[in-house]
């Protein structure tokens, strides 16, 4: 699973007081789960308490990484790798979290007019491993296996009804997993907490004495001295960013991003970056992918329909926003 490509930088007060205890800001990092960098920020009485709470988050992400892994099997787990392996052969009994993820993925497909499609596994793999430009015939052959209706879910059994199908949940799994990991932190006692999984940010309650978290958004223009273009003020919401700052591959001197447009069968390149804020983490993840693919007018309508706030950055560096985004966005001046 590929991480979304923009790291969101997190800002908060260092030390704040509650009525009964002095809560200090602590943070922890983890590398490896979901093939990305994980950063958790929380307020606790001391380092030992925070470390124990943060470990719950890392353990949950490790569990989910194995469940949603499409690249290899893991002992005693029926994961997405096995589901792909037995496509067209037999149903696979799975953990309910896999069923839930796939059900939400099918919902996201409908919501995004088919732009967020987890059945594009063969097409994504084609581009990921390409050494020369894929031909139209190769693209069509890969698309032949893509059909969201061929995912059959029943009683925590998953069956891909066409042999050769391949799921790739990179456009939604991180957002889905981040919310579950955040909940594990809350259950462990962290009240004011922010979690970033490869740049996908989820938040629960702001730091003591504050009304929100400030989440900085990295500049997608690598040819500038300014790393951050601004920050958004959020609480109990998720922030997801899609873009092409991280190269997916280079063919004939041309850099391609990792987000595939199912309509063209090629990497999307309409925008430099799209940021989406939503109450539900999985929805923010799915919508940021869709809005990166769709024409601006269609994306704006989609964001408004589903109560999302969004910002688009075009190749000429111009920016467009939903009205609500402007209300919480602070631009960093030169």
Image (tube, rainbow, N blue to C red):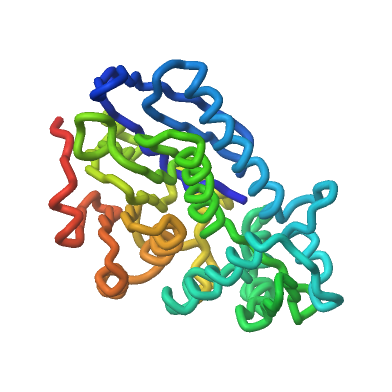
Residue drawn at (27%, 67%) of the image: 307
Quarter of the image for the C terminus: give it.
top left
- Residue 328 visible in the picture: yes
Tell me if residue 63 comes above or below residue 153 in the rendering: above
Left or right for 186, reference 271: right
Count of marks placed on residues: 0
Image position of 287 (left or right of 141)? left
At a point 82% along the width and 65% down the height, the residue shown is 85
Residue 253: tell me if it is visible. Answer: no
Image position, residue 87 (x, y; %): 79, 73
From this view, report whether residue 73 is shown above or below residue 90.
Answer: above
Q: Is residue 257 left or right of residue 301?
A: right
Quadrant of the rendered image containing residue 228: top left
Q: Is residue 75 above or below residue 159?
A: above
Residue at 63 percent of width and 60 percent of height: 97
Q: Of 208 and 222, which appears nearest the observer?
A: 208
The picture places residue 195, in percent across and down from the top left corner, at 44, 38
Name the residue nearer the viewer: 45 or 151: 45
């Amino acid at each position: 699973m590929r991480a979304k490509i923009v790291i969101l930088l997190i800002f908060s007060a260092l030390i704040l007081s509650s009525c009964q205890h002095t809560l200090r800001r602590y943070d922890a990092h983890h590398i490896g789960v979901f093939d990305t960098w994980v950063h958790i920020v929380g307020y606790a009485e001391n380092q030992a308490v925070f470390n124990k709470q943060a470990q719950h988050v890392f353990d949950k992400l490790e569990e989910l990484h194995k469940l949603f892994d499409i690249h290899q099997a893991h002992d005693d787990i029926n994961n997405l790798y096995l589901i792909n392996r037995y496509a067209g052969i037999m149903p696979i009994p799975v953990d309910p979290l896999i069923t839930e993820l796939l059900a939400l993925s099918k919902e996201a497909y409908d919501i995004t007019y088919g732009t967020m499609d987890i059945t594009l596994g063969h097409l994504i793999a084609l581009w990921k491993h390409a050494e020369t430009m894929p031909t139209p015939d190769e693209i069509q052959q890969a698309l032949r296996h893509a059909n969201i209706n061929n995912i059959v879910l029943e009683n925590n059994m998953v069956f891909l009804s066409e042999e050769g199908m391949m799921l790739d949940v990179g456009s939604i799994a991180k957002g889905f997993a981040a919310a579950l990991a955040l909940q594990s932190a809350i259950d462990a006692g962290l009240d004011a907490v922010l979690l970033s999984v490869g740049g996908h940010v989820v938040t629960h309650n702001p730091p003591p004495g504050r009304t929100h978290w400030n989440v900085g958004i990295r500049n997608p223009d690598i040819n500038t001295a300014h790393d951050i273009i601004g920050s958004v003020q959020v609480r109990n919401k998720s922030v997801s960013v899609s873009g092409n700052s991280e190269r997916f591959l280079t063919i004939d001197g041309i850099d391609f991003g990792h987000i595939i447009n199912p309509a063209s069968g090629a990497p999307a390149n309409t925008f430099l970056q799209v940021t989406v804020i939503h109450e539900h983490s999985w929805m923010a993840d799915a919508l940021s992918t869709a809005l990166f693919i769709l024409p601006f007018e269609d994306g704006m309508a989609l964001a408004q329909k589903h109560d999302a706030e969004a910002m688009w950055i075009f190749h000429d560096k111009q920016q467009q926003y939903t009205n609500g985004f402007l209300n919480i966005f602070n631009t960093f001046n030169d």
